[in-house]
Amino acid sequence: MRTIATMTGHALAAVALLAVGQPAAAENAAPAASVTAPSAEALRTIADSVLAEAYAADGPGAAVVVMRGGKIVYQGARGMADTANGRAIAPDTVFRLGSITKQFAAAMIVQLVQEGKLSLDDPLSKFFPDYPQPGASATVRQLLQHTSGIQSYTNMPGAMVPENIAKARTTAEMIAWFRDQPSPTKPGEAWAYNNSGYVMLGAIIEHVTGKPWHQVLEGRITGPLGLATIRYGVDGEDTPKMAKGYTGEPTAAAELASPIHMSVPHAAGALIGTVDDLAKWGQALHRGKVVDDAHYKLMIAPTVMPDGSTQPYGFGLSFDPLRGHPAIGHGGGINGFSTDSIYVPTADLFVAVFANSDSPQTGPGLVMRRIAAAAIGDPYPAFTATTVDLAQVEPFFGVYPISEGGERRFFARDGKFYTQRLGGSPMEVFLAGDDRFFYGTRTLSWFRLTRAADGTLAMEFHQNGESEAEISKRLGPIPPEAAAIAVPREELERYAGRYALGPATLTIAFGPNGGLIAELTGQPPVTLTPIGPAEFRVEEVDATLVFEGEQGPATATLLKQGGQEMRAARSGD
């Protein structure tokens, strides 16, 4: 799946060159059948194997911790904290936490609510009377739940370029950056992951206490709990145990990630720490040592929308079941780092995985879920690739609907099998026998092809490897693609240039074969095939680009993907 993640969270904010589905709510998920947890020795064997499969020894890697019943039962690490100097990652290596920071900010707000120093229903205007409407009417609760509607600064076109994020910013400067931007929605109207909301929560903490938010954190949480490594990144990244952050190809030749001053992510993502200290934090939070039971239940309650639907997000915490077991967690992504964590209440199990790359060989969430499932004795199914006659599978090629909207296509190309979600990139799948297909090590998802007695063809899809399958019936064959056309070189030259697409830059240039290619910040180039005078199909991703302007350099390009449209204005040549 191709995304741009600049402090995302499960990264701080994202612009995607493909559709990104929302996680399923976990609060009503039924636990799986009774299982037996493995011994510490057996778990170590499993976890070591998962790590070895996920990360090369000589490139950026990850650290892992597993805590069960309040005791650490596994610590592991793989890869290099500093490739140039040969320093290996260890369990006590320090990483940027990214958006895992949000739960700490949320906990401080809840503590202040408990003490009567503010209310969850206080509007933003109570603390900042000059904040413009409609954002001024957003409540503390809505800031916590990502329903405030204010503009998220990480989504502002051109905002997250190196020259903007590499310099120090005060809280006032951070607020000034986005306060006068148009609000995408009214408060409470819609759910949208929002980093500005957590900057404002940090600012509210400062307003109420009279101290910087990170000093309040040290006095209220990390100091009393003995979390020595969890601290503000601005003050702490000089530690000798700090990992270097990498980007691009996750090998020994990986490049250092572009700099970001840690004042920029603020209370939305500026903390650093170790996996061990995060496990201690998780134990304290979920065992009632941070907030009282009534307010903890508020933190882990899903967000209820005006139409009665729910979003699987509480206060700085999200919900996604693990093999049918309710689970609570949060991830993070920031320049050079990717993190994830999960707590399974029924097993009193906490797992965290921190990686020192923003484009890791394997996502920490996948490693985390594999180890966590093994730790509760309910591992994901293991698959071994086998071969099959293409003719046996061919009747199943076609389009299958997806419950949350959109479609998934199943097809073959050059003798290999692929699925592709509407707006997404093709993903190769492998036959594992018994009509089951899996995606290798890139995702836990798998599916089975079935044929009913009446001949109806269907796909039983197990998202994230969950036990319960989504069954979708084949709608029909894949529609033919629009034919490519010839476009004169002088016309193509009008489209070449740089365009601001959310926080990223979309560069249109000529490729080695003389046609246009597109490259989004942090992603490999993709090929553009003209299907109209100003319309191009993105070959590697199910998307199209339409350029605007009839004479001279194009003024903008419109990205159409997954049923959505995003306009990118020209920002340079």
Image: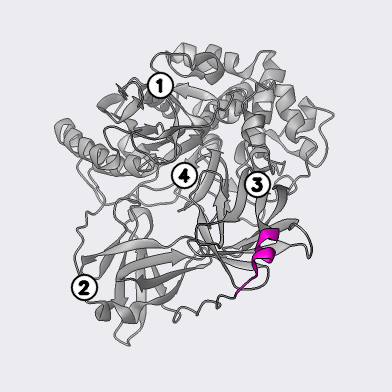
Amino acid type shown at disc 2: Val
Separation of residues labelled 1 and 3 (CA atoms): 30 Å
Q: Which residue is located at x 44 percent, y 65 percent?
A: 420
What label does residue 502 carry, if any?
3
Q: Earlier in the sequence, mark 3 or mark 2?
A: 2
Amino acid type shown at disc 1: Val
Q: Earlier in the sequence, mark 1 or mark 4?
A: 1
Q: Which residue is located at x 29 percent, y 71 percent?
A: 415
Amino acid type shown at disc 4: Phe
- Circle 4: is it few (<14), some (14-19), or many (20+) Cα within 10 Å? many
In screen coordinates, is 240 left or right of 203?
A: left
Residue linked to disc 2: 388
Residue 298: x, y in percent? 55, 36
- Decide: marks 2, 4 in contact (CB < 8 A)? no
Q: Does the segment drawn in magenta span residue 488? A: yes
Separation of residues labelled 2 and 4 (CA atoms): 38 Å
Residue 95: x, y in percent? 43, 25
Quarter residue 466 falls in: bottom left
Q: Relative to 7, say whether 430 is above or below.
A: below
What label does residue 94 carry, if any?
1
Front: mark 3 or 4: 3
Q: Nearer the viewer, residue 418 or 341?
A: 418
User: Which stretch did the figure color magenta?
Assistant: 486-494
Quarter residue 71 falls in: top left
Q: Does the segment drawn in magenta span residue 409? A: no
Q: Earlier in the sequence, mark 3 or mark 4?
A: 4
Q: Relative to 401, say whether 156 is above or below.
A: above
Separation of residues labelled 3 and 2 (CA atoms): 43 Å
Q: Nearer the viewer, residue 290 or 338?
A: 338
Residue 205: x, y in percent? 66, 21
